[in-house]
Image (spheres, helix red, strand yellow):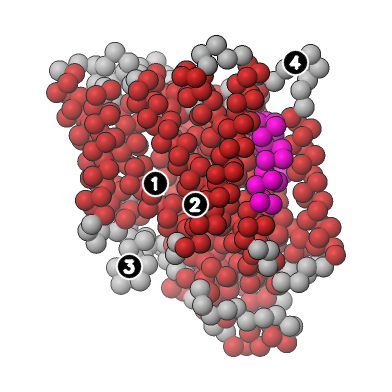
Amino acid sequence: MDFSTLDFIVFGAYCVLILATGLFVSRDKDGHEKNSEDYFLASKSLPWWAIGASLIAANISAEQFIGMSGSGFALGLAIASYEWMAAITLLIVGKFFLPIFIDKGLYTIPEFVEKRYSTNLKTILAVFWIALYVFVNLSSVLYLGSLALETIMGIPMMYGVIGLSLFAAAYSLYGGLSAVAWTDVIQVVCLVAGGLITTYLALNVVSDGTGVMAGFQQIIDAAPDRFHMILKKDNPQYSNLPGIWVLVGGLWVANIYYWGFNQYIIQRTLAAKSLEESQKGIALAAFLKLIIPFIVVVPGIAAYVMINDPEIMARLGEAGLQNMPGEGASDKAYPWLLQLLPSGLKGIAFAALTAAVVSSLASMLNSTSTIFTMDIYKPYINKNASEGQLVNVGRLTGVVSLVIACIMAPLLGGIDQAFQFIQEYTGIVSPGILGVFLLGLFYKKSNNTAAIWGAILSVPIALAFKATTMPWMNQMGLTAVGTMILIIIISHITGKGEDDEKGIDVSGGIFKTNATFNIWAFVICILTAVLYALFW
């Protein structure tokens, strides 16, 4: 793809703005040395709008822009369930999880395990999450981001890996969560602006310049099969999105695990000024999730309509645009659409894609550092560590994690689908961990012995289901249910039916939310229902 001087200037301005903002908010205040709360929880000072923006920036990465556009091209709007159901999940997290987490003053999710169950189980899960973030999440985001750079600009994979790593490290390792969260506000503006511009131009091209709404109606008319949220059994993609079971089955496991018990997501909500501020941020993120499919999935559907319409392709050919490569076309849909952008706007769209990658990298680095420092280093290596030592260990952990991820990232090129690699790896263990957490939160009889056995036995249960032809979402759902039944049974056997001494008291109006959150939650639920009704 040809980039003009203006595109490079726009992209360069974006890079300078992110670095300058990150370093500015990272500076030490006069007479105050950065402590662990400053570094890992942004001094607990984040306002609601920064929390909402940061949640979305941490979530959206290359797999959304490249992968979900590709899924829109291949199967249509049904992939939007990941986003629209996440909106409802966020509301559940805000109302039922955050009040407990913030009341307990958590730094990390493993810390909750210690307060509810035991130090041993906390340590096991802390080690697991560090390994997951470094070897799976960081590595795959680096790989997918570098693959996008290679596809769009021809940058060699290894150069892309190193460049993205250095960019994310330049501000996040020094400034901690403050730098990550405040730069995320800018990143989200870039993400939404870049996505909207690409969607606008794609739909305008489809309609031959008669407008976005005309273009949207045209792609609905041209590809009605791409606008069904609930796939039928004869659909080739049914095994990935198994019809009505998407709404009532295992996708809830993936969503609740990801949004409720994922350190690099939940950490910014723990850094809020107050519970009410955190809940308002959650509501903002939920609203933004409703918009995301229109800027990442719809362009993929538009690309599908374009390449199957000889008249449109003839117009594009006259304008000098290249045909989309046939092999692996779905994953090339979004990069191909960027050809439609004029000079200057290509730089904005490329900045949006880079923002998606870098913001996720920065969030994962900060959370990996937080878990290692607060759950491994402080309790086991240096119990008397000073605040300055904790901050420095956090920075060093980030450097080591990034180096390992840079080594691992190119190796993922041998895997057919990196996104599927993430889903399958986490899908084996996430149902068991979800069961441990949900019962820890809401079932007072759940005890440490039952939780450990539940987490261990969930893996063979998941592997047993994996040997069947059952859709993987259904496997996750049944594994989670099976794990929770086991935990309940073992709790009754070992605890003699009595409440565990560490059980959480959820009485006394702990889940009461203010009018602002309730109104937004109601609006978001109605909008989600309307979207599903329109595209059933």
Q: Nearer the viewer, residue 48 or 453?
A: 453
Name which residue type carries label 1.
Thr
User: What residue is at 23 percent from the left and 38 percent from the top?
Assistant: 457
Residue span colored magenta: 162-188
Whole-number angstrom distance, CA of label 3 to CA of label 2: 20 Å
Rendered position, 364 above or below 498:
below
Q: Mark 1 packing: few (<14 Cα in 10 Å), some, or many (20+)?
A: some
User: Mark 3–mark 2 contact, CB under 8 Å?
Assistant: no
Is 524 covered by the magenta stretch?
A: no
Q: Mark 3 packing: few (<14 Cα in 10 Å), some, or many (20+)?
A: some
| Earlier-in-chain disc, 4 versus 2 | 4
User: What residue is at 41 percent from the left and 36 percent from the top?
Assistant: 128
Residue under circle 4? 32
Residue under circle 3? 232
User: What residue is at 52 percent from the left and 16 percent from the top?
Assistant: 382
Name which residue type carries label 4.
His
Which percent across, then down, holds residue 32? 75, 15
Residue 371 shows in this picture: yes
Residue under circle 1? 426
- The disc placed on residue 83 is 2
Rendered position, 446 above or below 235:
above
| Earlier-in-chain disc, 4 versus 3 | 4
Q: Nearer the viewer, residue 222 or 409?
A: 409
Which percent across, then down, holds residue 330? 52, 71
Whole-number angstrom distance, CA of label 4 to CA of label 2: 41 Å
User: What residue is at 35 percent from the left and 23 percent from the top?
Assistant: 120
- The disc placed on residue 349 is none
Left/right of residue 407 with respect to residue 100 in the rendered view: right
User: Mark 2–mark 1 contact, CB under 8 Å?
Assistant: no
Left/right of residue 209 with respect to residue 328 in the rendered view: right
